Image (cartoon, rainbow, N blue to C red):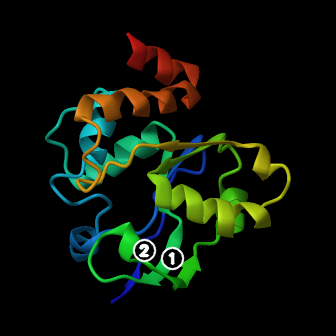
Amino acid sequence: MNVKSFSYIADPQAKILILGSMPGVMSLERQQYYAHPRNSFWPIMLNLLKLPSDLSYSEKTQALMQHYIALWDVLQSCIRPGSLDSAIDMSSVAINDFNHFFRCHPQIQAVFFNGQKAESVFQKRVLPHLSSELQKLTFQRLPSTSPAHAALSFNDKLNQWRTILQFLPSNKYDKLMT
């Protein structure tokens, strides 16, 4: 099935970009990032940002932007039956326009990958085409929040995801660390 990703969610002053590979079937159906109820992305974000667990999708995305966190996918489109990254037909992929994104979001300091596929495709298909200045950003893979990645517990994932907090402005970081 030919699938297309969503537009990014980002405030112009974003400092952090979190990249997935391609939304899963349930996310595509609901037109929401990380919509599968067993995906731990939103529980991790809400925990890190000390927010209530009952926020609507709109409130969650607003909270990310208020904390200078942008959200997007590496792939613009691809052929993939189902939701697994391993099912992506790599000969069919189209990449999102990262040069445009970074021009519109010049405050980005760090890019975090939600899993291995997002990182590997970015390294092969995006990084070589970025300016040398952008290649100096911090890039780090974090454990996938997908329910298919069950090798780590929620707490183990949460602890590894804490690293994003250090890239928040000090007034946000200090508040979240107390």
Q: Residue at x 59, y 40 (%)?
A: 15
The residue beneath circle 2 is: 5
Q: Quadrant of the N terminus?
A: bottom left
**Is 157 on the left or on the right of 30, as rendered?**
right
Q: Which SS class for mark 1? A: strand
**Is 159 on the left or on the right of 74, as rendered?**
left
The residue beneath circle 1 is: 76
Q: Residue furthest front?
A: 151
Q: Is residue 92 above or below residue 40?
A: below
Which disc is residue 48 wearing?
none
For the residues labelled 1 and 2, say whether their Cβ atoms are less than 8 Å apart.
yes
Q: Residue at x 29, y 71 (%)?
A: 83
Q: What kind of residue is marked 2?
A: Ser
**Is 70 on the left or on the right of 55, as rendered?**
right
Between 77 and 147, the one nearer to me in the picture: 147
Q: Residues within 10 Å of mark 2 (few under 14, many from 20)?
A: many
Q: Residues within 10 Å of mark 1 (few under 14, many from 20)?
A: some
Image quadrant of residue 4?
Answer: bottom left
Q: Residue at x 48, y 24 (%)?
A: 172
Between 159 and 27, the one nearer to me in the picture: 159
* Residue 49 visible at all: no
* Residue 98 visible at all: yes
Q: Position of residue 33 (x, y in %)?
A: 32, 61
Q: Position of residue 6 (x, y in %)?
A: 42, 71
Q: Is residue 82 above or below residue 20?
A: below
Between 48 and 38, the one nearer to me in the picture: 38
Q: Position of residue 59 (x, y in %)?
A: 27, 47
Q: What kind of residue is marked 1?
A: Gln
Q: Earlier in the sequence, mark 1 or mark 2?
A: 2
Measure the alpha-carbon separation of dots 1 and 2. 5 Å
